[in-house]
Image (spheres, rainbow, N blue to C red):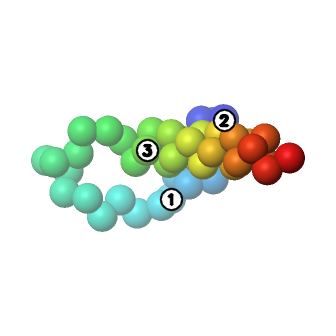
Amino acid sequence: MADIFTKRFHTLANPRQSAKVSYPLIDILVLTACLVTLQLRDLDSKVM
C-alpha cells in the first residue's frame, strides 16, 4: 500500500517546516488512509 501512495503522491508539496518534521508526509498519508479504511469497515459491520 505504501508503494501505491509513494507513486501517486511523490510530487505532493510538504508545507511543514523541515526542522519540526518527525515523520515523513508519506507515512502520515498511509497511516491516515489505513485508519479511514478500518473505520469504514468497522462502521459497515455495525450498520449491517
Q: Which three-letter amino acid code belongs to the residue tagged 2? A: Met
What is the distance, in whole Å, between disc 3 and disc 1 at their CAs? 15 Å
Residue annotated with mark 2: 1
- Which residue position is annotated with label 3? 28
Is 36 positioned to the left or the right of 18 in the image?
right
Q: CA distance from mark 3 to mark 2?
A: 13 Å
User: Which residue carries the number 1 mark?
Assistant: 11
> Is 11 on the left or on the right of 46, as rendered?
left
Q: Is residue 35 visible?
A: yes
Q: Residue at x 13, y 47 (%)?
A: 19
Mark 1 or 2: in front is 2
- Judged from the image, the secondary structure of the residue bearing numbered disc 2 is loop
Q: Secondary structure at mark 1?
A: loop
- Taking depth in this image into account, of 46 and 24 the one nearest to the observer is 46
Tell whether 21 sits left or right of 29. left
Residue most extreme to the left = 19
SS state under label 3: helix
Mark earlier in primary sequence (3, 1): 1
Q: Nearer the viewer, residue 41 or 33?
A: 41
Residue 37: give x, y in percent of width and height. 67, 45
Given residues 36 and 11, the one toward you in this image is: 36
Question: Can the viewer see residue 7?
Answer: no
